[in-house]
Amino acid sequence: MTARYLLRVCMPARDWPKVTDVLASIENAQTLSHTVNVCFPERPDLAVVETVMILECEPRYALEVRKKLSKRTRGTIGFYAIYRIREP
C-alpha cells in the first residue's frame, strides 16, 4: 500500500553535500521547493539550504529514507522531518 509523505530537509550550506546524493536517489519524489537563505553575509558556509519534497512510496521505503538521512545528518546542525500525509 503506497502512501504520500512530506519530506523537509534543512541544512547549512557547508553540510549540504552530505545529503544531496540521498535526495537525488529518492524514487517517486516531487520537489516542491528548494531555497537558500543567507543569514550571515560574512559566513556564507552557514547559509540555510532547504528542500521540501512529496514522496509516494511504501512505508518500508520511507523508513529506509529516514535511516539514510539520520546517518547523514548526524554531527551537523541540520535536520529533516518526514510526515505521512493523511488523505481525508
Image (cartoon, rainbow, N blue to C red):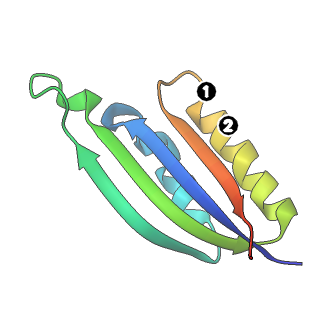
Amino acid on which disc 2 is placed: Ser
Identify whether 42 is placed above or below 85.
Answer: above
In the image, taking residue 76 as reference, residue 39 lies left or right, namely left
Left or right? Give the position of 75 relative to 10.
Answer: right
Compared to residue 68, the image places residue 61 above or below, namely below
Q: Residue at position x 54%, y 35% from top?
A: 79
- Front residue of this view, candidates 48 and 73: 48
Q: Residue at x 23, y 42 (%)?
A: 37
Q: Which residue is mark 2?
A: 70
Residue 33 point in image, percent of width and height: 38, 64
On the picture, is 52 further left or further right than 2?
left
Q: Of 33 and 68, which appears nearest the observer?
A: 33
Residue at 43% of width from left, 55% of height from top? 51
**Are the residues tagged 2 and 1 within 8 Å (C-beta)?**
yes
Percent x, y of residue 13: 32, 37
Q: Is residue 87 left or right of residue 15?
A: right
Q: Which residue is mark 1?
A: 74
Please state the horizontal and vertical placement of residue 25, each as a whole percent of the image: 59, 65
